[in-house]
Image: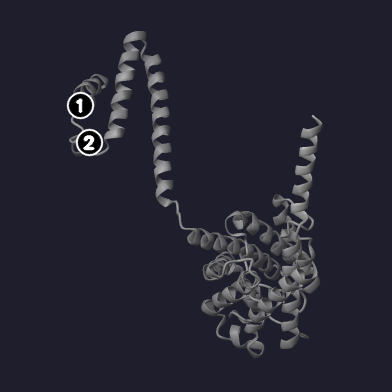
């Protein structure tokens, strides 16, 4: 066989016209590699005279050539799949980041509720959303800035920190990510949800039992106005903290630590403001999973219950986010000396000139 490959190489590998190569051999590069292997093994056997050594040599050649071809194919596939559009990259980044935030958060709620708090409680839920936020920022922060929240995107656009032309695809990615995350949690915990409903109810999906895994609902004492104020305050705290964490003139938090501090902020808000209505503070975290419950069988009551409660965790966070950004700007950001950097640069230049003169 190796003799035949050697002859083919001599007759076709070198002399075949370039225009006929793709016709006679559609996979010509791979064909040439195979022929080259045959020729190398044949030559090596003639020089060594050892069959075992020849087989080892041929195996190493095959391994190296196969790895090279796979690597080249991998590069070609990546080049074809790579997206050059910044809009699409940001859309996918916000979608994936919000997906992680909502998936881990809602899954922590499911684990606590369905186990009747044997495998989690309200404190573990707070940590679930906090760690979900941390991972989400790690995943998409370098691409889109990790807004993960339509209220954040709108507030930043209003104060000029985010281009208006990017608002639509940011929000679309966030709502889609929340929807997909809720769908995954529903798929993973569907057996547990129906088992729980059999144990505590009549086997049908009940809003009071399991719908709260996905979306937020008011507690017994919470009125619509009280919930609205709760959402405004919670999201306001979130935005003030985010502005402080990302303000380069404030504590100058290093970039790798930003996801950690954002996660701690979520935990703090949950510990402090979670009792009234579950601290949604994010329309994508609430509306998208609520749509999943509507589709999955909890019914239209998911939107009509408690005097159409659903609008509270949508409107409240937007108002709170705008207030939070303006409060930080009015109280902190606008009071930084404008010439801080220019003064430091001027001082460094003067020092350099003084050193030059002295020398």
Image x and y of residue 23, in percent: 19, 39
Image x and y of residue 351, in percent: 80, 40
Number of numbered discs: 2
- The residue located at (60%, 64%) in the rendering is 98
For the rendered model, the colour scheme is one colour
Task: Mark 2 or mark 1: name the one nearer the start of the chain.
Answer: 1
- The residue located at (30%, 33%) in the rendering is 29
Please name the residue that numbered disc 1 is placed on.
12
The CA span between labels 2 and 1 is 10 Å
In the foreground, 170 or 297? 170
Image x and y of residue 170, in percent: 55, 67
* Quarter residue 59 falls in: top left
Image x and y of residue 110, in percent: 66, 68
Please name the residue that numbered disc 2 is placed on.
25
Q: Secondary structure at mark 1?
A: helix
Q: Is residue 130 above or below residue 326?
A: above
Q: Residues within 10 Å of mark 2 (few under 14, many from 20)?
A: few
Residue 155 is marked as none
Horizontal side, residue 240 vs residue 167: left or right: right
- The answer to whether residue 197 of the structure is visible from this angle is yes
- The answer to whether residue 120 of the structure is visible from this angle is no
Position of the C terminus by quadrant: top right
Report the residue that reaches farthest toward the front.
357
Marks 2,1: beta carbons within 8 A: yes
In the foreground, 170 or 75? 170
Q: Is residue 253 above or below residue 87?
A: above
Horizontal side, residue 332 vs residue 212: left or right: right
């Amino acid at each position: 066989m190796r003799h035949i490959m050697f002859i083919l190489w001599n007759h076709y590998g070198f002399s075949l016209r370039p225009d006929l190569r793709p016709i006679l051999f559609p996979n010509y590069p791979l064909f040439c590699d195979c022929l080259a292997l045959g020729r190398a093994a044949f030559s090596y056997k003639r020089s060594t005279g050892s069959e075992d050594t020849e087989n080892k040599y041929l195996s190493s050649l095959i391994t190296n050539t196969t790895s090279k071809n796979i690597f080249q194919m991998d590069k070609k596939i990546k080049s074809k799949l790579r997206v050059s559009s910044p809009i699409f990259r940001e859309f996918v980044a916000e979608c994936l980041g919000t997906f992680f935030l909502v998936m881990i958060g809602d899954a922590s709620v499911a684990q606590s509720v369905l186990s009747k708090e044997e495998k989690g409680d309200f404190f573990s839920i707070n940590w679930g959303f906090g760690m979900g936020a941390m991972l989400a920022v790690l995943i998409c922060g370098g691409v889109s800035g990790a807004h993960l929240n339509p209220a954040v995107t709108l507030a930043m656009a209003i104060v000029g920190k985010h281009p208006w032309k990017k608002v639509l695809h940011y929000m679309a990615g966030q709502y889609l990510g929340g929807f997909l995350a809720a769908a995954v949690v529903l798929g993973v915990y569907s057996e547990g949800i129906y088992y729980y409903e059999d144990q505590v109810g009549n086997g049908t999906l009940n809003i009071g039992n399991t719908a709260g895994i996905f979306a937020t609902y008011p507690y017994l004492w919470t009125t619509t106005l009280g919930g609205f104020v709760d959402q405004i305050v919670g999201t306001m705290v979130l935005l003030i903290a985010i502005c402080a964490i990302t303000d380069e003139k404030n504590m100058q938090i290093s970039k790798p630590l930003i996801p950690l501090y954002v996660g701690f902020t979520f935990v703090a808000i949950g510990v402090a403001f979670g009792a009234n209505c579950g601290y949604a503070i994010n329309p994508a975290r609430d509306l998208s999973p609520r749509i999943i419950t509507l589709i999955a069988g909890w019914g239209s009551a998911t939107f009509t219950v408690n005097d159409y409660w659903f609008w509270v965790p949508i409107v409240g966070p937007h108002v709170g986010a705008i207030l939070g950004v303006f409060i930080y700007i009015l109280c902190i950001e606008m009071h930084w000396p404008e010439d801080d950097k220019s003064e430091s640069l001027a001082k460094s230049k003067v020092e350099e000139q003084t050193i030059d003169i002295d020398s």
